């Protein structure tokens, strides 16, 4: 499955094969291609600023070391998210999986009028707070769908569930988050 | 146009990969439920947008680790451990059958090197691995060896080698 970022260069699968054939440049290209999306996912999932970099590093490291187990029917990105999700899950088990809420992000597009921007800001703040209260799987399904734009099949592959369950989790998350919209 | 159809289109519109058709825009204008969902999805799209990561520095660190950290062959290690545990189970099953009739069975003690060093949870993992199939990347909620971090794996490995 091609991701948008593959349109301008070799596919993820081609880069992965090149890395396996010894090209460090190919591995670096894969990191540059997916680092930002992974950081956004981890941040949305509640990782603190210092944690995001460590988790991203570990996720890429594990991905390259375990590349043979990447089944190519899912995208490299959703496979990477599955590793990142497992790392977050491990952190929960060890009691370190705090969900950190950012209070200082200005993450809305420019060009809005001040009144609507205020409402959108308020909504965004409520959604971030609401996300932190969702069960982990609902939160991650919501992020992979709304933030990353993955389809249910890819979400299922990333989170080790079925497309049907992913859809149900997504709609549960939406139903709870809708209650927070002013 | 149903609410479900509109819901399915929201992530791609929020990502800028698609735009609303006239019919969809009209539905959105008149349906409060869909408007609330659209607000949620739009806000969800923007969550984490402030996260900044230096991708070049990250790539350099990942490559450094790939060059310097030894490859841990989990498959071989796990297969070795499974073999050991399987031998223990077979011994437990077969030993009583070998005893002469009419004599009380002595207390059963099977000495399997390495297993003594395992914690209860680790032992449970070994037994579980005898029954279930496994993959390199753990995606289930059940704990497994794949869930251990490199330091924990090293600690376990050392305990097996004693
Ligand atoms: Zn509707």
Image (cartoon, rainbow, N blue to C red):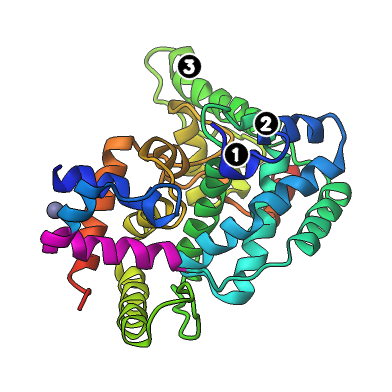
A119 lies above or below A52:
below
Residue B121: x percent and y percent?
48, 50
Sooner in the amino-acid sequence: mark 2 or mark 1 = 2
First to last magenta residue range: B29-47
Give the mark toward the camera: 2 or 3: 2
Q: Secondary structure at mark 2?
A: helix
Q: Secondary structure at mark 3?
A: helix
Contact between labelled residues 1 and 2, with CB atoms less than 8 Å apart: yes
Chain containing mark 1:
A
Q: Which mark is residue B94?
A: 3
Q: Secondary structure at mark 1?
A: helix
Mark 2 sits near ligand 1, with its Cβ under 8 Å away = no
Decide: few, some or many residues near mark 3? Use Cα within 10 Å; few <14, some 14-19, many ≥20: few
Q: Nearer the viewer, residue A137 or A103?
A: A103
Reading the image, the residue beneath label 2 is A13
Reading the image, the residue beneath label 1 is A76
Decide: few, some or many residues near mark 1? Use Cα within 10 Å; few <14, some 14-19, many ≥20: many
Residue displayed at 40% across by 78% down: A112
């Amino acid at each position: 499955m091609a991701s948008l970022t593959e349109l301008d260069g070799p596919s993820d699968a081609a880069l992965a094969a090149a890395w396996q054939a010894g090209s460090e440049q190919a591995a670096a290209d894969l990191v540059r291609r997916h680092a930002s999306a992974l950081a956004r996912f981890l941040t949305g999932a509640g990782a603190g600023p210092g944690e995001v970099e460590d988790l991203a590093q570990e996720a890429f490291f594990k991905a390259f070391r375990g590349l043979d187990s990447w089944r190519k029917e899912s995208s490299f990105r959703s496979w990477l998210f599955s590793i990142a999700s497992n790392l977050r899950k491990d952190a929960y088990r060890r009691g370190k999986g705090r969900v950190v809420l950012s209070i200082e992000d200005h993450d809305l597009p420019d060009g809005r009028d001040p009144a609507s921007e205020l409402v959108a800001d308020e909504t965004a703040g409520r959604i971030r707070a609401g996300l932190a209260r969702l069960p982990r799987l609902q939160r991650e399904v919501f992020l992979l769908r709304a933030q990353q734009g993955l389809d249910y099949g890819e979400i299922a592959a990333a989170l080790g569930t079925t497309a049907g369950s992913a859809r149900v989790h997504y709609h549960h998350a939406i139903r709870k988050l809708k209650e927070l919209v002013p | 146009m149903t609410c479900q159809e509109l819901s399915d289109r929201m992530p791609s519109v929020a990502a800028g990969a698609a735009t609303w058709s006239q019919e969809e825009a009209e539905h959105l204008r008149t349906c409060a439920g869909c408007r609330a969902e659209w607000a949620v999805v739009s806000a969800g799209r923007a969550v984490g947008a402030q996260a900044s990561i230096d991708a070049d520095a990250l790539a350099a660190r990942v490559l450094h680790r790939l060059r310097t950290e030894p490859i841990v062959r989990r498959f071989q290690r796990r297969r070795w451990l499974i073999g050991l545990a399987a031998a223990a189970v077979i011994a437990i099953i077969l030993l009583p059958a070998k005893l002469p009739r009419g004599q009380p069975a002595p207390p059963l003690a099977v000495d399997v090197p390495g297993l003594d060093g395992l914690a209860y949870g680790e032992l449970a993992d070994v037994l579980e691995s005898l029954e279930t199939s496994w993959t390199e990347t753990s995606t289930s909620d059940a704990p497994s060896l794949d869930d251990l971090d490199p330091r924990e794996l090293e600690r376990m490995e050392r305990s097996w080698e004693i």
